[in-house]
Image: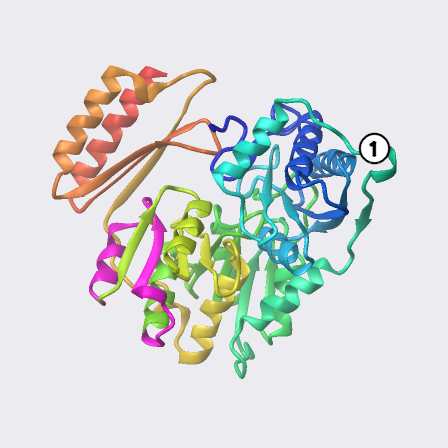
Amino acid sequence: MTRKLFGTDGVRGTANTHPMTAGMALRLGEAAGRYFRRDGSGAHRVVIGKDTRLSGYMLENALTAGLTGTGMNVLLLGPVPTPAVGFLTRSMRADLGVMISASHNPHQDNGIKFFGPDGFKLSDEAEAGIEALVEGDLALAPPDQIGRAKRIDDGRGRYQEYAKTTFPTGLRLDGLRVVIDCANGAAYRAAPEVLWELGAEVIPVGVAPNGTNINLNCGSTHTDTAAQAVVAHGADVGICLDGDADRVMILDQTGRVADGDQIMALLAARWADEGRLNGGTLVASVMSNLGLERFLSGRGLRLERTPVGDRYVVEAMRRGGWNLGGEQSGHIVMTDYATTGDGLIAGLQFLAEMARTGQPASALVQSFEVVPQMLKNVRYGAGAEPLASPAVQVVIKDAEARLTGRGRLLIRKSGTEPLIRVMAECEDEAMLVEVVEGIVAAVRAAV
């Protein structure tokens, strides 16, 4: 079955515009409830978390109405990180978990992500099954079997306590001054509190959400704000999360940024030395830098590449029995600890390495030399298919020929926004610019 509503990470769009309307959220709630109650058995439960977007209230209420209408009992967590929903779905023996968030997108966007009872995001097949129910006739529960809704006040606290258990016993963060940028998002309380409880001197940034400032000039996609705070406060390290805290970027004491590739390289090398890296394999998407692949190969380790999207990284990890993966964008997936990307727990692993080795962040944020990489996005309108243009295809074919043996090219449609993403890597930077700009110009002409 094909999927129309679901992209690479749930259903996403502009709030109060299809498909992110209250009506569609209601329908999705009904469809998901029916899908997970298709065996017709007794009471079922679902946990719902959200980030700090204004539209989260609307979607939360609509989803609750749809789910309770099919007989599901709803447990409302309030603002919590996405990985907390995965953790609590499994911990609370729920049949379904829902996170209302558009991750790193601006406040006017929102999204709905579903987790299965095992705490992992749903498969393509499950999402297609829910879509089929959205489009069909839905049998609702009889009046005496309508579900109930209940606020869970300690959900965030449960997640915080679990996150601390992933930090090595016997280590503390005493003496470390840490800037934590929460992007005015879902971790605005959880992340600073965990760091403080582990002994760090915490300098919080992006912890004053107002419903419309999530990811605004802060967080993992706008690291300049945290970098300025690191330098101004003489901090030892900076941790930048995104709006739902499933991504992380690390800053050293000078404000230099380590992206997901560098964090994965550090952890993979350490875990391999400790005999903890299952199968000697790291899983990452096709966007990860060629330098990461060379770094791993030089240590006798392997890089397994997947399509873009942390869900596909996790699926590959589960198939192969591998326990470390992620994306350049900052999703770091450690299935020993979490079912999805967890920015806070990944940050704790970096801090643990600082505490264990006594080395400054600057000695840890660059494990390999990056092959020059260039990424440009081209926005297109509804109904446009610029990659189908013969003129665009000719330019792409020529670019691939030029890069053969010297680099690589990746062109794809975004799964979360109407964008064509053009990425290339090449050690010849002049050629790199020519190739990318040529394709971008052709795509723009086509749209």
Q: What percent of the width, then of the height, locates residue 163?
A: 59, 66
Q: What percent of the width, then of the height, locates residue 281?
A: 31, 61
Left or right of 296 on screen, residue 46: right
Residue 274 located within the stretch drawn in magenta: yes
Magenta stretch? 273-299
Q: Identify the residue shown where x is 39% and y is 60%.
A: 321
Residue 146 drawn above or below residue 87 = above
Q: Identify the residue shown where x is 61% and y is 58%.
A: 87
Residue 71 drawn above or below residue 87 = above
Q: Identify the residue shown where x is 54% and y is 51%.
A: 120
Say whether residue 259 is visible: no
Residue, far right: 144
Give the residue pinned by disc 1.
Answer: 142
Q: Quadrant of residue 22?
A: top right
Q: What percent of the width, then of the height, locates residue 59?
A: 70, 35
Q: Identify the residue shown where x is 73% and y is 48%.
A: 45
Question: Which element is circle 1 on?
Answer: loop
Q: Which amino acid does label 1 sit on?
A: Pro
Residue 27 drawn above or below residue 147 = above
**Dot 1 crowding, Cα within 10 Å, few <14, some 14–19, many 20+:** few
Q: Quadrant of residue 126?
A: top right
Say whether residue 15 is visible: yes
Which sits in the foreground, 129 or 91? 129
Q: Quadrant of the C terminus?
A: top left
Left or right of 6 on screen, residue 69: right
Which sits in the foreground, 259 or 333? 333
Residue 168 drawn above or below residue 247 = below
